[in-house]
Image (spheres, helix red, strand yellow):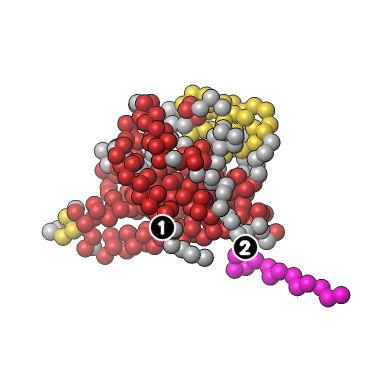
Amino acid sequence: MQTELPRDVIAFGESARDRFRALGGVPFALEAETDDAARAQAGAALDELGAWDIDARGDADELLAAAQLCRMAGAVVLPYPVVERLVALDGVPLALLDPARPRLDHGDLFDAWVAADLDGTARRATAGRRTGSRLGPFVTGAALGDAVAGVSTDDVARHLLLGAWRITGALDNALSLVAAHVQARRQFSSALSEFQAVRFATADAYVALRGLDELAKYTAWRMVTAAPAARWADAVALRLHAADVAHDVLRCAHQLLGAIGFCDEHDVSVIDRHLQPALRLPYSAEGLADALMPSVFDGSFESLFSPAPSAPQSA
């Protein structure tokens, strides 16, 4: 597996990063909470980048371009359903949700949705009103309609993969902001970064995030090399690990930032709040673990403890 991204994918990601920063970065996401025109601007910026020309169901380079776009969007928690549009079904955005508690992030941006459970069972969906939660300011309720054919577990896997790349981008930016804070903030005539406990905490968070980054690349490679059942299991495992790493990184960020980390004047507060739908939809970490367990037992999820392939029988 090649862990370095292709040069054209890196260049595309840099263009996306610069375009999203030109919108205003993380503060732009905060502005969008009270100004719907901001989300229209985000959509226009994606149009300019040619985001919807990317075939997220295509070859490895196409998938990596989509993943890198999601990562850059995550870094500024871009107020737009990038993942859902990249894996759209016949132009209709595809969301993953829990049928028992249907919720759509940015549901009010589109009149029609396709909503699928983790097993690929899909139905048409229409958005209701926003829930009003600060932990997901653009989340709406949803009404489910008729069944929809044509959604596969591979569609679900790519949705989960791209969502994990978006989470990785957000965590990367949050940790960078924390690193800048502990180097600038002084206590007892020393920068916070000089204290051993602070160094240990940030090092642990950094190592966890770098591990998630490598797993995200590995899972993208598996999307074009592994069998369908293994692709789905790997994507669920990646999303589950992303949720675990997010818990650790955001906890570290809030501990080191103190009270300011819970105020929207600091970007980490906005990143944390806007990231919650990606971490909680369609299921919590516990729900994802429950969904993954059958694949562990039947061998679809390959690990160090997977049963060895059976030897071919001689005639």
Q: Is residue 205 above or below residue 127?
A: below
Label 2 and label 1: CA atoms lie apart by: 30 Å
Q: Quadrant of residue 203?
A: bottom left
Q: Which residues are magenta?
A: 302-315
Which of 162 and 302 lies nearest the eye of the viewer?
A: 162
How many numbered callouts?
2
Residue 255 visible here = no
Task: Specify the amino acid type for callout 2.
Answer: Glu
- Residue 59: x and y in percent read 56, 53
Of tags 2 and 1, the one toward the viewer is 1
Q: Is residue 70 magenta?
A: no
Secondary-structure class at tag 2: loop
Which of 83 and 259 lies nearest the eye of the viewer?
A: 83
Q: Residue at x 65, y 44 (%)?
A: 152
Residue beneath disc 1: 7
Q: Which mark is residue 189?
A: none
Task: Specify the amino acid type for callout 1.
Answer: Arg
Tag 2 and tag 1, C-beta contact below 8 Å: no
Q: Is residue 308 magenta?
A: yes
Q: Residue at x 59, y 29 (%)?
A: 125
**308 to the left or right of 96:** right
- Residue 85: x and y in percent read 51, 37
Q: Quadrant of residue 226?
A: bottom right
Q: Residue at x 47, y 31 (%)?
A: 106
Secondary-structure class at tag 1: helix
Main secondary structure found in the magenta portion: loop
- Residue 177: x and y in percent read 28, 50
Q: Residues within 10 Å of mark 1 (few under 14, many from 20)?
A: few
Mark toward the start of the polypeptide (2 vs 1) = 1
Which of 49 and 134 lies nearest the eye of the viewer?
A: 49
Q: Is residue 34 above or below residue 10?
A: above
Q: Which mark is residue 302?
A: 2
